[in-house]
Amino acid sequence: MERRINQLQDLLKSEGIPAFYVSNPYNIRYLSGFTGTSAKVLVSQEKAYIITDFRYREQAEKQCQGLEVVVAGGSASQDSPLAFIQRTLSQACYDKLAFEDEDVSVAAYMALDEALDVELIPFSGAIEVLRQFKDDEEIALIEKACDIAVETYDFMLNTVKAGMTEIELANAIDFHMRSLGASGVSFETIVASGLRSAMPHGVASHKVIEQGDLITVDYGCYYQGYCSDMTRTFALGDPGDKLKEIYAIVQEANRRVSEVARPGLTGQELDAVARDYIRQAGYGEAFGHSLGHSFGLEIHEAPNASPSYDEELQAGQLITNEPGIYLEGIGGVRIEDDLLLTKDGNRILTPASRELIIL
C-alpha cells in the first residue's frame, strides 16, 4: 500500500495540490487495504491518514500499513472527522484540499465547505488512473477469482437440466462460487435461455429452461475484494442451424481478439477486430455493445475497448473480450474472456472451453 500512497503523493506534488480527501470506498481500499465500511483517507504530500471510528480501530491498525490511524467521532472527547482534517490542514498551513467531486453529494460538499477553512478543489479520477495498472498482488487475487469462475463452468454444465428455472441455475452458480472461496458475486448473475438469450443483459428470470434452448450465462465473483467476469454460451439439446452459425462467428471474433490484443493498440482498434469480422459476416447490427471493459476492485473500470475509446492500451491493464450477436425472436450468443495485457501480448485468465457444448 505504501507504493500506492507514494504514487498519489507524487501526483499531488506535480499538480500543486497540498492534500487530498478520499471518500470513494473502492479508492480507500486501494490506498489503505481497509475492508471496513466506515472510513475516509486524507493524503498530504508528506503523510497519509485513515480516519475511522472506534469500531474499526483494531482492524485499521492491522490492515492499513503506511497510514496513520485516526479515531474520530463517536464520543464527546474526540474530534469529528472534519474537525481533525481542519486542524491537520491548519497546522500544515494548507489552504487547499482536493476532493472526489464525483463521489461527494451536495449535502456532503456543503458539510465540507462549512467545516473546512480551505479552498475545495474537484479532483476525481486521479486514483482510478492508478488503479488501471494491476500490481502482482492484485493480479494474483484476480487470477483466483477467474479460476473460481472457470471451475464453476464445469459445475454449471453438470448441473443444468431441462425443467430448472433460470433463477435456480443462477443460485446454484452463485452458491458454488462461494463454496470455492468467493465472498460474493461481482454482479447479478445473468442466465438467459431460449429466446431470452437475445437479451445481452437478461438477468435470470423464472423462465423454465427447455430442451433445445441455447443458454448464455454471464457471471463472476469477488475474491478478497477483486472481480472476475466471464460469459459462456452452451445448448441443452440441438439449438438449430441459425444459432450454431452465429455461435461460430462469435467464437471466431473472440479468438481473433485474443490473438492480437497487446499494448499499443487503442481500445477502438481492438474493438474493431471483432466488430469488423461480425459485420463482414452480416451481423453488424446485432452486435450493439462495446467489445470490453476493464475490472478490478469494481466490475467496470477503465480502460475500455469500444468504438469511441482512442487511448492506447498498456501492459498491466485488464480488458474483457466479449463479442456477441443477438437476434430478437431467435436467440443470442456471447463469449467473454478476461485478458491481462503483457509486454509481449496478453494472457487469457479464463481458459474454459469456448467450443459450442451441446448437452
Image (cartoon, rainbow, N blue to C red):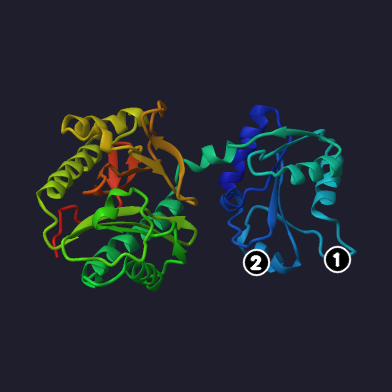
Between the residue at mark 2 and the residue at mark 1, the CA separation in whole angstroms equals 19 Å
Residue that mark 2 sits on: 59
Instruction: Report the quarter where the C terminus lies.
Output: bottom left
Answer left or right for 276 relative to 76.
left
Seen at 80% across and 42% down, the residue is 110
Q: How many marks?
A: 2
Answer left or right for 53 relative to 75.
left
**Picture quadrant of residue 158:** bottom left
Mark 2, other Cα within 10 Å: few <14 / some 14–19 / many ≥20: some
SS at badge 1: loop
Residue that mark 1 sits on: 75
Seen at 37% across and 50% down, the residue is 201
Vertical placement of residue 244 versus 59, above or below: above
The answer to whether residue 95 shows anywhere in this view is yes
Could you say where residue 162 lies in the image, as x and y percent from the top left?
A: 21, 70
Could you say where residue 330 lies in the image, as x and y percent from the top left?
A: 21, 49
